[in-house]
Amino acid sequence: AQKITQTQPGMFVQEKEAVTLDCTYDTSDQSYGLFWYKQPSSGEMIFLIYQGSYDEQNATEGRYSLNFQKARKSANLVISASQLGDSAMYFCAMREADGSWGKLQFGAGTQVVVTP
Amino acid sequence: DTAVSQTPKYLVTQMGNDKSIKCEQNLGHDTMYWYKQDSKKFLKIMFSYNNKELIINETVPNRFSPKSPDKAHLNLHINSLELGDSAVYFCASSQDGGRAYRRNEQYFGPGTRLTVT
């Protein structure tokens, strides 16, 4: 069964607008971490933001914020004030309980294109 | 300074050949990983090493053999290459495998694009 679901294969957003990328996850663990990575066309994977299952506050990192709704098992990424350089593939990933030794499970990704 | 480096960046080879990809991290991390990204961009873990010890082998064919000569290096050797092995292979590292609720993010190398013809 898919552990991470990203339902938006692609989206267009205008420069300076905010965009929300959806991510839902499936786990029975109490202890887990959620990550978002960015993959531009150049191919590298760039860590953006992290949310721990025990964190009470939504994570924020600059223009990135995470809308964490634990009961709904969703961890949506919000990019505020989009820039042309935000055009990339975005991956949601989960790391489950202790003993998984850091194994990240990724969603299928969402391709974001920022237009002028 | 490159945190996680991989060589080569591109690898084109014929079916049946054997090839290796090298990975080095200078972050002082204890845990290293290999991921495979297929043509649909789906990323899946292959192996995880902690302090040179194999921790995760995610049902990868025996033709794939990782080796970690020390904590900073994790190489991937592939025997008898098949067309289906064509993919981008990413090396990554993190401070440790750690507790799931700690940040402990993974840093990825630039990837090695393997094309098997």
Image (cartoon, rainbow, N blue to C red):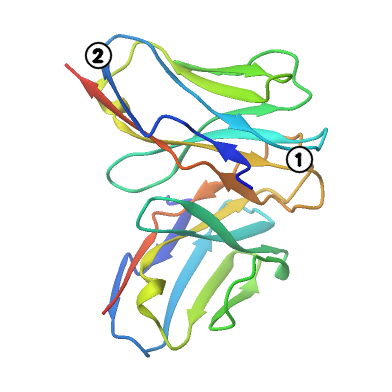
Name the kind of residue labelled 2 in the image.
Glu
Left or right: A21 with respect to A73? left
Q: Position of residue B35 (x, y in %)?
A: 52, 59
- Residue A58 is situated, as x and y percent measured from the top left of the image, at 64, 14
Asked if A50 appears above or below B87 in the picture, the reply is above
A21 versus B79 height, above or below: above
Instruction: Please give the label number shown on residue B92.
Output: none
Q: In terms of image quadrants, where is residue B88?
A: bottom left
Instruction: Give residue B63's position: percent from left, percent from top.
Output: 53, 83
Crowding near pointer 1: few (<14 within 10 Å), some, many (20+)?
A: many
Q: Amino acid at mark 1?
A: Ala
| Chain letter of disc 1 in the image | B
Is residue A94 found left or right of A47 in the rendered image?
right
Place residue A20 in its image quadrant. Answer: top left
Against B70, residue A62 (above or below) is: above
For label 2, count other residues whose C-alpha is less than 10 Å away and answer few (under 14), some (14-19) or many (20+). Answer: some
* Residue carrying label 1: B100
Q: Mark 2, chain letter?
A: A
Q: Residue A15 got which mark?
A: 2
Q: Are marks 2 and 1 on the same chain?
A: no
Q: Secondary structure at mark 1?
A: loop
Q: CA distance from mark 2 to mark 1?
A: 35 Å
Residue lying at the far front of the rendered structure = A1
Q: Please report the residue visible at 33 percent of the width from the left and 48 percent of the height from the top.
A: A43
Compare residues B50 and A53 and report the one nearer the observer.
A53
Q: How many marks?
A: 2
